Image (cartoon, helix red, strand yellow):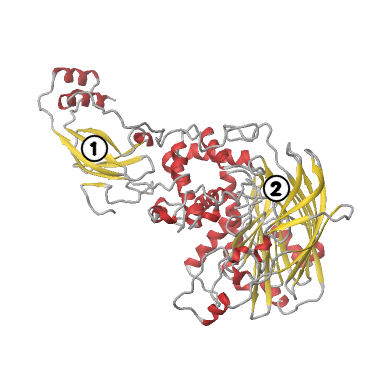
Amino acid sequence: MTVYRLFMYCFVSLLVSGVFAQEKPEKGHENTNKFRQMYREFATPNRYRTAAGAPGSAYYQQRADYKMDIELDDRDKRLYGEETITYTNNSPDALEYLWVQLDQNIRSEDSPALLRDPEHIPPVQKEEEFVANHMKAPFDGGFRIEHVKDTGGKALPYTINFTMMRIDIPEPLLPGEKMSFSIKWWYNINDHTIDGARSGYEYFEKDGNRAYVIAQFFPRMAVYDDVEGWQNYQFWGDGEYALPFGNYEVNITVPSDHVMDATGTLQNRKDVYSKAMIQRYEKAAKSFDRPVVIATQEEAEVREKGFSDKKSTWKFKAENVRDFAFATSRKFILDAMAVAIGGKTVMAQSLYPREGNPLWEAYSTRVVAHTLKSYSGYTFEYPYPKAVSVHAKDQGMEYPMICWNHGRPEADGTYSDRVKYGMISVIIHEVGHNFFPMIVNSDERQWGWMDEGLNSFLQFLTEQAFEDNYPSRRGNPSGIVDYMKGDQDFIAPIMSNPENVYQLGNNAYGKVATGLNMLRETVMGHELFDYAFSTYARRWMFKHPTPEDFFRTMEDASGVELDWFWRGWFYTTDWVDMGIKDVKKFNISSEVPEKVRETMKADNITGMPRYFYELTFEKPGGMPMPLIVEYSYADGSRETVKYPVELWRRNDKEVTRIIASEKELTGIAIDPKQETADTDLTNNYWPRREAR
C-alpha cells in the first residue's frame, strides 16, 4: 500500500492525462466476456436440482432389484442366465414402457458397431494379422433372449433395437408402483484378448485353461430420470453405462475346481472354500499390515490340471449397487488383507493366475488398501464390505467392489518399472472407480469425464501419496500441453459425448485431471478445493449427478467464482498461453518533491524506489488463468507474485502492470514452475531466452 502510494506521487509527472477518444462502433455485440456468468450453458435450477448444486426437494431416482441364476459353461464358452427384475417407479411420471440395456449385443455378428468407423489396410501387414482383421467371420456374441415374462408367466412383448430393448407393459406403471418380470437368455463368451472387449476370457495355451472376467452379462435396466427421461442412447463402446441402484441376489454355477469372486458378499463360503481357505480367510480378516494368501499358487497349479466335471454354485448378495460382475478360473490365486475405514473393516482382495507373480503378490492387494484409504480421505468413507483387484491381460475395467487390471511380468518373473508402475496405476484407477461412478453415480453414457476425469484426478493424488516421485502419467499441467496445442480439427471440448471424441484419454481423463489439479494447486488452494470436492461427493453419493451439479457445488461450497474456468476448460478447446510483450524502464529525478517527503515520513518509509517498470503481459491463448510472475533482481533476490485471473477481465488480450522497486529488475519469468499448462514458453521470459 505505502510503496504504491509513493510510486503514484513519483510517477504521476511521467504520465500525460487525457480522454480516450472512441469512434462510434459499426455494430453492437453480445456479451462475449470470458468472465460472464454461465446462465446459457447451465440448466435452469428446479425442484429436482438446486442452484447450489445439491439434490432438490423433489429429487427422485428409480430402483431396480435383481435375483439371478447364472451358469458358466467352460467347455462350450457360453453363459446362461435367468433373472427376475423388480422395478420401482419413484418418478412423478407414469411409464408406458420400460427400457433394458443389452450391451453384449455390441458383440453380435451383425452389430452396427462393426461398420461405423473408417478402415484402411496398412502398407505392411503380417499375413496372420490380415487374415484375422479382414478374412474371418465376425464373432457372434450377442444376447439370445429366450423369453420375457411377467410374474404370472405371461409373455411380455418386446422390441430389440441394437443394444436396447423396449418392453411393452400392459398398462402404465404409475408413480410409486413396482413391477416384476423375468428374462431368460444366453450368449457365447468372447476372448477379450482378441477383440479388446471389457468382458470375456483369456485362454492359456500352455495348460488349456481360461480365466473369465464377466460383466455386462445380463439385461440391465436403463436409467429414467429428470434430465434425460429414459437414457437409451446406444452402447457403441466408448460411452459406458448409466444404471440405477438396487439389491442383487446372484447364484453363479461354475466348475467345482474354480476360485471366484464377485460384487457383493459371499453367502456360502463353507460350501465353496476348503477348510484351509476358510482358516486363511479368517486370518486375513484380522491382518491389517500385510496380505494373507487364501488360495495358494501351489493349489492353483494342481487345479489347473484337473478340469473337474462337477459343479459348484457360489451365492452372492449385494446391497445398493448399480451393477454386478464376477471373475472365475481354476487358475486363480487369492489373497486378502483387512483395511480400517472409519469404524469398520473392509477387505482388500486380489485374484490372479501364477502368470501374474511375483508382481501381483507383492503389490496388488497393498495398492487396493492404499487406494481405499486415500480416496476415503478426499470424499467419504468407503461404504462397501470389500474391493477386489483381478489380474486380466490388457484390461482396465471397473465394477462395484471388483475390477480387472493389467500388468504381467515376463515368463521368467522379471518386470520393468514401466510394467510395475503401469500395474499400480491401473489398480488405483479401477479401484478408485468404486467412488466415481459406482457410488457417485454419474451418467457415463453421456458424460465420460464425470467419472474418468474426477477419478484420474484422485488417482494422481493417490499415486503421489504412494511413493515419492511417483511417475504419474496424468495430472501434472505440463503433461497436457501437447494435447492442448494440437490440431484443433482433432480436439473436442470436454463437454462432449465420449463417442464423438478423437482422443478420449486426453479429453476425458488427462485434461480433466489436470484442470482439477490446477484448481487445487493454483486457483483455489487445498483447503477450499478439498472441502468443496468432498461436499460434492457426499451430496451425490448413491445418487445421479449432472455436470452442473458438480460445477455449482464447487462454487457453492468454496465461495470461489469459477464460471470462467468451467467455460474455458470444459466447454471450449481454448489453450493457455501467456507471455511478456513489452518492458519499459523509467527514470525519475533524484530530487525528491516535498509532498513525497511528507508521505514517506507519514508512512515510515525509509527507502526510496529508484526503479519503475511498465510491464505489458499478453495472452495469445484464449484460456484465462492466474498470471504467476517471478521477478529477479540485481542483488540476486527473487520474488513471485500471483496476479488473480480477474486481471484479464477487461482486456482478454493484454494487460499492463507497474513495478516500483529499490532494486534493479534483471529478469522476469511467467509460470516458472509450469503450473498453468502454458503451451508456449518461448514468450515467458525477459530478457528473451530459451525456455527452461
Around disc 1, counting alpha carbons within 10 Å, would you say few (fewer than 14), some (14 to 19), or many (20 or more)? some
Comparing 573 with 377, the one in front is 573
Q: Residue at x 46, y 36 (%)?
A: 563
Q: Residue at x 72, y 80 (%)?
A: 305
The residue under label 1 is 615
Q: CA distance from mark 1 to mark 2?
A: 56 Å
x and y, in percent, of residue 271 in the image: 82, 64
Q: Earlier in the sequence, mark 1 or mark 2?
A: 2
Is residue 308 something one can see in this rendering?
yes
Q: Amino acid at mark 1?
A: Leu
Q: Amino acid at mark 2?
A: Pro
x and y, in percent, of residue 164 in the image: 69, 56
Task: Give above or below for 662 relative to 241.
Answer: above
Q: Which mark is residue 244?
A: 2
Task: Give above or below for 651 relative to 201.
Answer: above
x and y, in percent, of residue 239 in the image: 59, 55
